[in-house]
Image (spheres, rainbow, N blue to C red):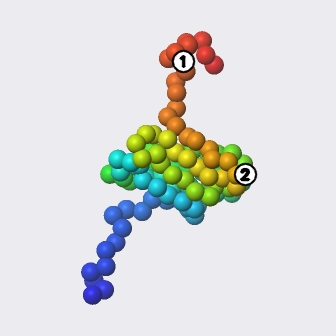
Amino acid sequence: TPDAVDKPHWVSQDVVNKVKFASCDLSGDGEFIVGGANGADNKYEVYVWNTSTGALMDKLTGAGVSLYAVAWHPARTFLAVATSDGLVDMWGPRVNWTAFAPDFQ
């Protein structure tokens, strides 16, 4: 019956720009979802949301190329982004280099 149709638990989007996502994937543990979109300024954007809360956790801006696909490593915190220049960009955890070298700038 029409009343039995399921609806999404929540919808992830860039509420300001309403970008159209080209690709998405779930983290290996299911804790996060990643969506990749092509920005207006020819730079791709990668959005990471928490699947439990729907909160946007991070937004990453890539190089001046188009995004074709995004994939999350099944066991580690790495993202792979296939781009229009034929390369695969790898994204990983940010490193606080000042923790290792206090004078690092």
Q: Do the residues labelled 2 and 1 touch (CB within 8 Å)?
A: no
Image position, residue 74 (x, y; %):
42, 47
What kind of residue is marked 1?
Thr
The vertical placement of 96 against 7, above or below, is above
What residue is at 52 percent from the left and 32 percent from the top? Answer: 94
Cα distance, mark 2 to mark 1? 33 Å
Which one is in front in this view, the residue at disc 2 or the one at disc 1?
Answer: 2
Mark linked to residue 44 = none
The one nearer the camera, 68 or 45, is 68
Q: In which quarter of the image is residue 91?
A: top right
What kind of residue is marked 2?
Asp
Q: Report helix, strand or loop for mark 1.
A: helix
What residue is at 39 percent from the left and 48 percent from the top? Answer: 28
Q: In which quarter of the image is residue 66?
A: bottom right
Quarter placement of the C terminus: top right
Mark yes or no: residue 55 visible.
Answer: no
Circle 1: is it few (<14), some (14-19), or many (20+) Cα within 10 Å?
A: few
What residue is at 55 percent from the left and 12 percent from the top? Answer: 102
Circle 2: is it few (<14), some (14-19), or many (20+) Cα within 10 Å?
A: few
Q: Name the residue under label 1.
A: 98
Q: Name the residue under label 2.
A: 85
Q: Quadrant of residue 101?
A: top right
The one nearer the camera, 58 or 81, is 81
Q: Report helix, strand or loop for mark 2.
A: loop
The one nearer the camera, 87 or 5, is 87
Quarter placement of the N terminus: bottom left
Image position, residue 11 (x, y; %):
42, 62
The vertical placement of 77 against 32, above or below, is above
Give the mark nearer the N terminus: 2 vs 1. 2
Image position, residue 8 (x, y; %):
36, 67
Mark yes or no: residue 86 visible.
Answer: yes
Image position, residue 93 (x, y; %):
49, 34
